[in-house]
Amino acid sequence: MAEAAVSAGRTPLIVGKRLSEVTEDVCRPLDTRPTALWWAGFVFSLALLGLGTAAIAYQVATGIGTWGLNRTVGWAFDITNFVFWIGIGHAGTLISAILFLFRQRWRTSVNRAAEAMTLFAVMCAGIFPVIHMGRPWLFFWIAPYPNARGTLWMNFRSPLAWDFFAISTYFLISAVFWYVGLIPDLATARDRTPPGLRRRLYEIFSLGWNGSFRTWHHYEVVYLLLAGLATPLVISVHTIVSWDFATSVIPGWHTTIFPPYFVAGAIFSGMAMVLTLMLVARVVMGLQAYITHRHVDVMCKLILLTSGIVALAYGTEFFTALYSANQYEQFVFKNRALGPMAWAYWTMVSCNVLAPQLLWFSAVRRRFLLVFIVTLFINVGMWFERFVIIVTSLHRDYLPSSWASYAPTSIEVATLLGSFGLFFSAFLLFCRLIPVIAIAEVKSVVGTPPAGTHEPAPAAGRPALSAVEA
Amino acid sequence: MANESPRRYWRSLEERAPDDAFREAAADEFPPAPEQTATLFGRRGFLQAAGFTLAGAVSAGCQRAPVRYALPFANEPETVTPGRSLWYASTCSACEAGCGVLVKVRDGRPIKIEGNPEHPLSRGGVCAAGQAAVLGLYDSQRFTGPRRGGADATWEQVDADVLARLAAIRASGGAVRVLSQTITSPALQAAIDRFLTGFADGRHVVYDALSASGVLDAHARTHGRRVLPRYALERASVLVGIDADFLGTWVSPVEFTRGYREARSLEGDPPRCSYHVQFEGRLSLTGTKADLRVRILPEDEPRVIEQLVARVAAKAGVAFEARGGAPAVDGAVLDDLAARLWAARGESLVMAGTPDLAAQVLVNYLNQLLGNYGHTIDLERPSRQRRGEDAAIERLAGELRAGSVAALVVLRANPVYELPAVHEFATLVPRAGLVVSLAQAPDETSALAAIVCPDHHALESWGDAEPVDGLAAVVQPAIRPLANTRAAIETFARWSGQDATALDLVRAHWQQAVFQRSGAGEGFDAFWDRVVHDGFTVLGAPSGQPAAFSDGAVTPLPASERQGDGFALVLHPTTALLDGRHAHNPWLQELPDPITKITWDNVAALAPAAAERLGVTSGDLVEIASPDGSGQPPLVLPVHVQPGQHEGVLAVALGYGRAGTERFADIGPRWLDAQPGVGPNGRVGVNLAPWLITRGGLVHASARRVTISRLPGRYELATTQHHHSINEPRSVSSAGARPLVVETSLSLLRSSADQELAPHPRYESWWPDDHPTGGPRWGMVVDLSACTGCSACVVACQAENNIPVVGRDEVRRQREMHWMRIDRYFTDAADDVDVVHQPMLCQHCANASCESVCPVLATVHSSEGLNEQVYNRCVGTRYCANNCAYKVRRFNWFNYAHPSERENLVLNPDVTVRTRGVMEKCSFCVQRIHEARTEARRRNVPLADGDVQPACGQSCPARAITFGDLNDPKSRVATLARSQRFFRVLEELDLRTSVGYLSVVRNREATSPEAHHG
């Protein structure tokens, strides 16, 4: 039992923690009363949520006219927010499924939070396709359900119908995946919780987990299968979302590079959001030992990669327009860069292409404050990317007679803020009720060898696990 | 032990003693199952009760909207079949032009006005204002009954009052004046004349707010008859308009448009194309169609006329000396024009709108030199559409000032609003002893009247019209009067001591005065029935004799001096509001101006160079003042930069700022961020009529000089076509050269006519047709060369399809609802701009981009090629509108409620009124297709070409819209679709539209092979 958890030449991801300390550290917020800081954040988030709810209620009661849309610009904040949140929701599944299959063990520190973030983001995203409808109370008509209208069915040729399937599938699989991963930790929490309602709830949701070999074995198999199932979804969801635009005839939307462009953008924005949240959480919740420089470093590199893909897509769009000899296409891109909404375009470029270049420098990657600021820029930039794609393409399309402008109303801004309110409220509750780090998984990278393995002795300079093992 | 019962504990003896029920139960050999024994709430009982409660609660909550029964008539009127419309031939009352109309009546309500195709003047066309008149019928603010001293009264009261006062006047010999605009109704005119003969000093004072007094006065001088001649544009091959917006607002635009179109029918046999030159200061509708447009200052108009006369006189070998000074325009232009005019002697036409008498005399001389009288100008059967005399107003003002008018009766006129301030009618009207107004709705003049005897709306009343000498038409009611009003003719008859209904009066007049002129062989009853059926009759002999031109009347112009600094203020009517009489009609207020595309406001239109000089852009506020400080107090208007306008001209529309337009402050949806629907003065626009000036007894709309100074602040105009910020780089503010319109010149068209050369590449698709149509495939071809942009189709569509009015604020937010819009594009031409009007509506693509993206199949393709919108299936994702390349889809952002229940009576029961949250768009008037097909089936005949006409095409004065079956190779629309001029907009997208266009052809020499622009 005196061997390191990792192969020779690799530093363990988490050092200086005993396994029991891991449990203690992660479960501590579950056992203690919330801090004033948490309350402040929660009340603020709830206030935003209330504001957004009021705005949505007013809009549904009064009409979509309370938004700044017009006969030419039929989508703006609504679909921008939708695509933005769906994008945010991408990192979770990427980290938990794809990186799991690729045996990226650093994911263990962040996957739980990332998956939770995915769920909350998809919830936020799901609001918008419903409320953007003129008659939201009939939203279920886009689902194929048995009805009394004879042969009337939905339109399977419409990308919005594909969206419905893509998002509902994604939400379902993400939720199941997240929950399955939670079961061992819920059992841990159950075992630590004194009898009472909370314990009863943990008992129910841990599904009678007993930690036996058979249980672990089944768990591992299911987790692997789910990871395999979730992996294509990472690609498919944003691909299908991008088809909302790519299958249209509108210059600036009608382009074949949208699927990879959107997927890369989604991973980019999702990673940025994970970092934004975790950089705060690790300090506030005292998880510095679990989310270390190495985690941040790896994620920064991933951001740098996806930023490069996104930048390439931006350039490709211009090249395609130039090469197409299609004047409408060319005009849209000229208009993006120089037109009345050029400020949005250049905000997007600065935030998504220029700001991440700082991450080339390891000095920057090591300074969490700088990384945090860069991720904030990326969050803003990726919101603007969707805004630019949607609004600047629509507002000046084929017939100049119909060109229009767009400006959001207070109701739209309140709705956007409300979605952030929902996201942060849900995330703050999550921090208090569920272990934010996958305890069982992260223990595998603490340096404890998996049972039964025999690895060479740890290199000098690393703490002997026997010394810290309970 | 199992059989050991627990010890029983009891509290009282009753409890201990087994009761009857226990004994019964004990006696029962076969006890029921334990569930059933539970007394009140066993498990099943509970579930039953809970289920019942839930079902009850649900069924109570599921109550549908209260049932309202549509009851049939107890006694069904003989002619009324529910669901079928009746059509009544009548005469339009929206202006004095007197176009023939057919009024569509459904269930006793007039709901639509369409052109009478057999009417000799309009020949099926109706303008925007004429179509909107049906909404005016249901105006909730019309007078509901007679009023006396500002309070409601009965007819007996007001009649007794008026008759008593008139008797006193008759006794004292006081002056009685009836003041009206031109009255084209012979019967009403006779009633007024009869009324006035009862007084020693009774006179009918006639004026026109849109005056043609100068033309009439000139003819009085040159021909001895004070009439407006009838212009036959269809016979003119060279046409000169000098500040006469004859296609837009001047005298009889529908008639003129039809004639103009006929003279330029490129698809005709033989093809014709007249040559049209327009001299003007502002950019008028007529100017946009001109083959050559010359921008001149209004004060230069007489000199241009004079110089043109001099050139033509030289060709005619007549001595004429122009003394007007320096040439106002390039002499070469006038030389060329004079040569063309001379070559087209007898089939040319010069029309001028200037009120200047000397200039109008010269115009007559010019037409005389060209031999146009008797050919393109008819004086034997002159027009009666303008008979007003500006000088009469001046005389009446003098009498009022002197206090010598005992009674003033005002009908069909609003002098307080529409006359120049110099006449001071606002203060003079009350000086008359008795002021009686016969207005239909409250206006500035009726507010000053002691007694109001409201007239019927023309759709409620019998009447007649003789807009052109020898063309007598009837006005017949299409509905019983909605309120306690009385026809003006009855009112005058009553005051003349005659108690008869309007029908009797009109009939009697026709029997006496019209019947024998008709020369009809039938009896009067048969004649009358035929006229009421047809709506009009053409009378035999002209009423007047041809008058000879007296050369002596022609005098050279007095040498004019250049006027002072500042801008020449050009006041002009608009196609929608005319002189302001339609300012209470929301359809017309929301109709985009054909040139500026501005709704709900009038603006200070400045040429780009002038705006640049002043440092203003569209939307900036400016103050307009008289340079000498005299005249009117300065007023504030928003600037609109208008290409094509003369640099020295400031053009402002008349007809705005009417009292009572405060009612539109709340029009449109009211919500958190809603802005008022009126301007800062609380009204819609600003009234410029006080700025009119009189000179030599004639009202001049374009003779005032003003200065303009920029004010801080901006005002956002509600336009349907946006103007772009000047701060943007040109590469993005201009769309570049987009092939949206194909434009060609006549010479090029003729030179390539023999070659089978398609003007536009046709794209063949590799894919099979998605929607093959076995039967008809409905399609439309719009002739852009014929379209004048008059916007009659826009209002026709609005009336037919229950399109809501959304108000200024919503238009400002670019949410107007018109299914049919007219895109107006400018293009550079020499030193001027050319204008193209492109009616744009749903193109009914066979390969529609909207259809594939709707998730709920709310927009689908019909078997007849229609792109159909299913309102009750639409959930409002707006994806279809985003994906429409033509942006013709309109979304119901709110519930656009109509302002009053009464105005809802105008709704067409064949068309669904849409609720909020659903998309809508042009349906190709699918209800009319069905109606025509049902009718054909009823008559057991196949549907013929032309049986189906959408509302827009029906009323188009220029016959620019052709609708029909594209699958029928012999149909007119299919023939036009094979034309060399045919093109589709954005054809390269392969949407396979069912709407196509015919290229714009200008009568010019080819300068470039083909011009595409947008």
Image (cartoon, coloured by chain):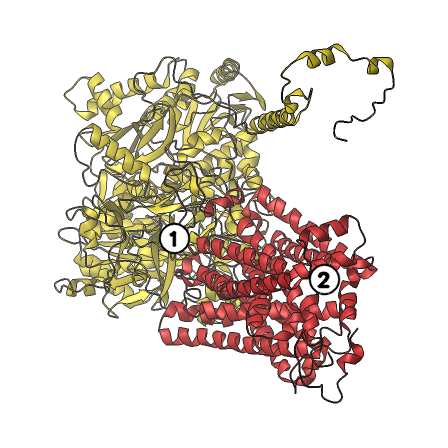
Q: Residue at x 15, y 62 (%)?
A: B753
Q: Which chain is yellow?
A: B
The percent position of residue B251, horizontal first and vertical second, equals 34, 42
Q: Tell me which corner region of the image, top left, top right, bottom left or bottom right, holds residue A326.
A: bottom left
Q: Considering the image in quadrants, where does the N terminus of chain A appear?
A: bottom right
Residue A22 image-quadrant placement: bottom right
The kind of secondary structure element at disc 1 is helix
The residue closer to the viewer here, B115 or A25, is: A25
Question: Vertically, is A371 above or below B693?
Answer: below
Q: Residue furthest bottom?
A: A460
Kind of residue at badge 2: Pro
User: Is residue B468 visible from the viewing direction of this image?
Assistant: no
Q: Classify residue B733 as left or right of residue B40.
A: left
Q: Is residue B993 above or below residue B197?
A: below
Q: Indicate the chain on which mark 2 is placed.
A: A
Above or below, B222 against B941 in this view is below
The answer to whether residue B57 of the structure is visible from this angle is: yes
| Quadrant, the C terminus of chain A | bottom right
Asked if B425 appears above or below A273 in the picture, the reply is above
**Label 2 residue SS:** loop
Side (left or right) of A363 relative to B533: right
Q: Nearer the viewer, residue B893 or B386?
A: B893
Identify residue for label 2. A435
What colour do you see for chain A? red
Residue under circle 1?
B850
In the image, what residue occupies the spot 64% across and 21% down? B36
Q: Amino acid at mark 1?
A: Cys
